[in-house]
Amino acid sequence: MWGSRVIRTFRDKRESVLWGAGGAVALAVILLSCSTTSRTILAPPSIPGAEFVGSEECATCHEEIVRDFRTATHARLQAKGDNAKNMGCESCHGPGSKHVQAGGGAGTIINPRKSPDTCFQCHLDVRASFQLPHHHPVLEGKMSCSDCHEPHKGIATKGAPTNIQQRLKAGGFAFLSRNETCFECHTQQRGPFVYEHEAVRQGCTVCHSPHGSVNQRLLNERNATLCLKCHFQEQRTAGHIFIGDVDHSTFLQQGTCWSAGCHEEPHGSNVTPLLRY
């Protein structure tokens, strides 16, 4: 009995020492990480034989782009000094010395419009979204990131610049027009409609995941679950779901809200506020 107690005490002390040592190492790693950088650092794209020349050199030909770039979200990548020349235009386009020597031209600089890989080197979460079953055809080469995003000015979303926000008036209230990018291709959903689905005013991303989704039509949720996130009322009796004053318990069993013959026009209708026909 006495011997087993000594062994147990020794084992407890040894484990305490090991845990303490491990915790000290982990703490040191955390403190070292926090003290050295506050964000992920990625190497810019490379061009064989080319050197970095700095964003000021780019302004020689691309004056307007460099001028407006100060308003861009991507401008946060810029840094000062010769040791940080690659943290401007060349952080996405690669070193530009050969491009300058050639007086411009394709093949001497990286054009992110041709491939999303340049964008993916920072936007890793977006790369993962495009691997989902339903996504915009960017990986297939039918679209590019710049079809929806403006990398050189504003907040990188077309139709929503930073300096003077584009606003529309509706019912006496002003709201941001964040849907313009989507409406460039999805013209049928633009309207105007006599009866508008109010969710559209909040933005297409309320219902859709633009980069990719496990659901068809890039929907955030499957089937009627999406609609019930907003259109839901307390159950008045067990097993019954009321939306407004109508018991939808049996309707929801027939299919999705827009495929069961009830609300075929989820974006808006010119006939009825029930978003039919």
Image (tube, helix red, strand yellow):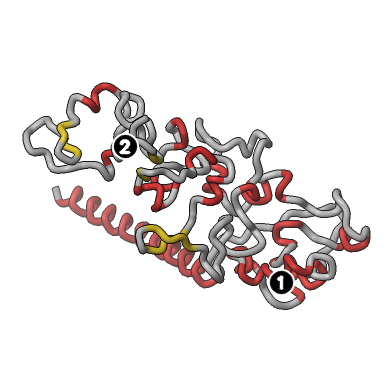
Residue 67: give its label: 1
* Residue in the image at 19% along x and 31% along y: 248
* Residue in the image at 45% along x and 45% along y: 192
Task: Please identify the quarter of the rendering in which residue 220 is found.
Answer: top left
Q: Position of residue 47 (x, y in %)?
A: 82, 53
Image quadrant for the C terminus? top left
Amino acid type at circle 2 is: Thr
Q: Position of residue 210 (x, y in %)?
A: 50, 43
Q: Position of residue 276 (x, y in %)?
A: 34, 32
Q: Nearer the viewer, mark 2 or mark 1?
A: 2
Q: What element does badge 2 sit on?
A: loop
Name the residue carrying label 2.
Answer: 272
Count residues near mark 2 (Cα–Cα under 10 Å), then give few for <14, some for 14-19, many for 20+: some
Q: Nearer the viewer, residue 202 or 119?
A: 202
Q: Is residue 257 above or below residue 104?
A: above
Q: Position of residue 23 (x, y in %)?
A: 38, 61
* Residue in the image at 17% along x and 43% along y: 233
Q: Nearer the viewer, residue 220 or 64?
A: 64
